Amino acid sequence: MEHEPVKGHLGLPDIRVLLKGGGEMASGVAWRLYQCGFRVCITETDHPIAVRRKVSFCEAVYDGHARVEGVDALLARDVAEALEVWEDRKIPVLVDPECEALSLLNPDVLVDAIIAKRNTGTSIVDAPLVIALGPGFEAGEDAHYVVETNRGHNLGKLLTSGCAEANTGIPGSMLGITTDRVLRAPGSGHFRNHFDIGDLVKKGDIIGRVGDIPVEGKIDGVLRGLIRPGIEVRKGLKIGDIDPRGVKEYCFTISEKARAIGGAVVEGILRRYGR
């Protein structure tokens, strides 16, 4: 579907961005791009698993609608409906795990925000500008730019060559707590919850169960994220997140990490199209 970008507000072209992934990091990127006036379309799997569901646009796959900090996303059945959602000034979400919309939407920018820690099929020739988040990509080879996603001094840095830092497998520190703040499936089976996102929990509380196996919290804090009840999980999968800072508001707002990454993607687009 060929198009000629027209000048939008601030003199920038009316830029189309196709964004792979609708989890927390991807949603932080989508939110920031939307606020800058870019047209954003999200592609997702048919059963996305988001821990920070309250700030993830992929929830539209289940509910038909998702809202993150005042921005609305709607589930679109096909590309034609996605275009209608754009005209309604909302973000369309397509169930499109193979990203078939790429050839139909002909985006100006493709952002791989799956955060799979590996390249699942993105190529630098997929769009005039390709930006990839995190490890598994090499700038200049797999994508034009790669964004550093590891917490630390370089978080949000836009790389024009080389790769992001390798995945350490250790969650970012909050008040000095790392692995103990993450809830992982103790076995395989269907998850059901005993607490909800935003609840204050204590060390030793049974947050939920996978099958008949209890999921026990290891720290005090607020339940910042938790996967949808009823989802089938495998042993070891991240299914929840306890924030030791205990601030309930953080459960329903975009994290500083997602905002930083979103800013890097905006920078990449402006480097290409804003001059």
Image (cartoon, helix red, strand yellow):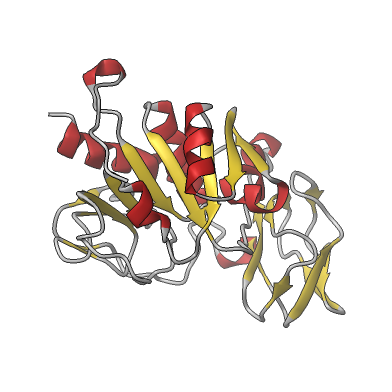
Left or right, 29 with respect to 171, comes to: left
Q: Residue at x 42, y 39 (%)?
A: 40
Residue 196 visible in the snapshot: yes
User: What is the residue that sits farthest to the top in this orientation?
Assistant: 10
Q: Residue at x 79, y 61 (%)?
A: 229
Where residue 179 appears, as percent x and y from the top left, is 57, 67
Residue 255 visible in the snapshot: no
Where residue 273 appears, as percent x and y from the top left, is 18, 34
Q: Is residue 14 shown above or below 11?
A: below
The image quadrant of residue 71 is top right
Q: Nearer the viewer, residue 27 or 130?
A: 130
Count of numbered tags: 0
Where residue 214 appears, as percent x and y from the top left, is 83, 74
Left or right, 134 with respect to 55, comes to: left
Q: Residue at x 53, y 35 (%)?
A: 85
Quarter of the image with the C terminus is: top left
Q: Residue at x 28, y 50 (%)?
A: 154
Q: Nearer the viewer, residue 84 or 117?
A: 84
Where residue 103 appears, as percent x and y from the top left, is 33, 56
The image quadrant of residue 249 is top right
Q: Nearer the viewer, residue 54 or 236?
A: 54
Left or right, 222 with respect to 236, comes to: right
Left or right, 119 with respect to 53, comes to: left
